[in-house]
Image: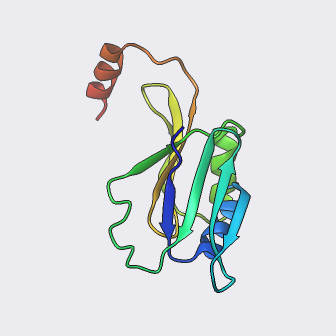
Amino acid sequence: MTLPILAVKNYDASLKFYTEKLGFTSTLTMQGREGENTFGFVEHGEGVRLGLSQDSSDLTGRGNGVILMLYPTDAEIDELYNQVKSAGVKITEELKTEVWGDRLFSVKDLDGYYLTFCKTVASMPSVEEIQAAMNSQP
């Protein structure tokens, strides 16, 4: 199992974004020395679990180049896309089906982490077929 811990500027704001906008469930929240919420876990079904950790240092550049591919087991991807979009979240990559068989869309969270929600909707063809399909796209 891999469990990403995302450094966030404001734990409570991030928790609200993940639970109210993206459909995650909070499974644990811990308080820091001053009594404020600073760390916790969120889940999307059994397939996706992330940690959120409040960090007061400069977060500029964290997460650059990283794409978190999330495969929530409890969600239909089209319904999740509509829920996220209607919650006012900016979609950075519109809903589409890729040649390898994943239906997906992407968003950025409050701290700039790139999240791609995916659902495998077709059997993956051979590598040669995927490459040929990718080469034929404009």
Q: Position of residue 97 (x, y in %)?
A: 50, 33
From the top left corner, tell me how far across and down residue 28 is, in percent: 72, 60
The quarter of the displayed image where residue 72 is located? top right
Question: Is 138 left, or right, of 24 in this rendering?
Answer: left
Q: Give the residue furthest to the left.
A: 135
Left or right: where 45 falls relative to 67: right
33 or 101: which is nearer to us?
33
Residue at the extreme front: 33
* Residue lying at 58% horizontally and 53% vertically, measured from the top left: 50
Q: Is residue 52 visible?
A: yes
Q: How many marks?
A: 0
The spot of residue 74 in percent (x, y) is 72, 38
Q: Is any atom of residue 95 visible in this view?
A: no
* Residue 3: x %, y % from top left: 53, 47
Residue 79 picture quarter: top right
Image: 21 above or below 59: above
